[in-house]
Image (tube, grey):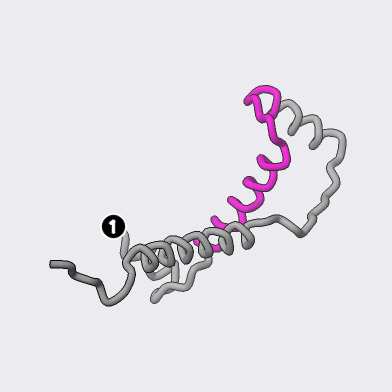
Amino acid sequence: MLFLWPYDLSAKMAKGKKKDNQIQVSRDKALIRKHKAVFLLNDKELEAIEAYCKKYKVANKSKFMREAVIRTVMEQFLEDYPTLFEKQDLDRLII
């Protein structure tokens, strides 16, 4: 006896994979860096960064600086996150 599915499962599975692939492509597109940020350093600041990169074997200075800036921004966002109580009130509760 031959049983026919009401629809082709392989086609549905392929569509699911295509959708996952589309999500991956759109996520990759969102992560493309297209905005330029430039800043200047004085001699001492540059010397300090170069010494740090040499000591800790930082190969990609651009990645290092980008991650340092984003880390600082994210820490500030987390610190400023709205809470139900003020910080002073929470500090008084801690024993």
Please indicate whether residue 94 sits to the left or right of residue 57 in the image. Answer: left
Q: Main secondary structure of the magenta part?
A: helix
Query: Going by the image, does 16 lie left or right of 72?
Result: left
Q: Residue at x 27, y 77 (%)?
A: 6
Locate residue 88: give its quadrant. Answer: bottom left
At which x and y percent is residue 36? 79, 56
Report the span colored magenta: 52-79
Relative to 88, is 37 above or below?
above
Extreme front residue here?
A: 1
Count how many numbered circles sit on residues in the image: 1
Q: Residue 12 appears in which quarter of the rendering?
A: bottom left
Q: Position of residue 75 (x, y in %)?
A: 54, 55
The residue at the point 76 percent across, 29 percent down is 50
Q: Nearer the viewer, residue 69 or 88?
A: 69
Name the quadrant of the N terminus. Answer: bottom left
The amino acid type of the residue labelled 1 equals: Ile
Q: Is residue 13 above or below residue 38?
A: below
Q: Is residue 60 visible?
A: yes
39 part of magenta stretch? no
Q: Residue at x 58, y 51 (%)?
A: 71
| Residue of label 1 | 95
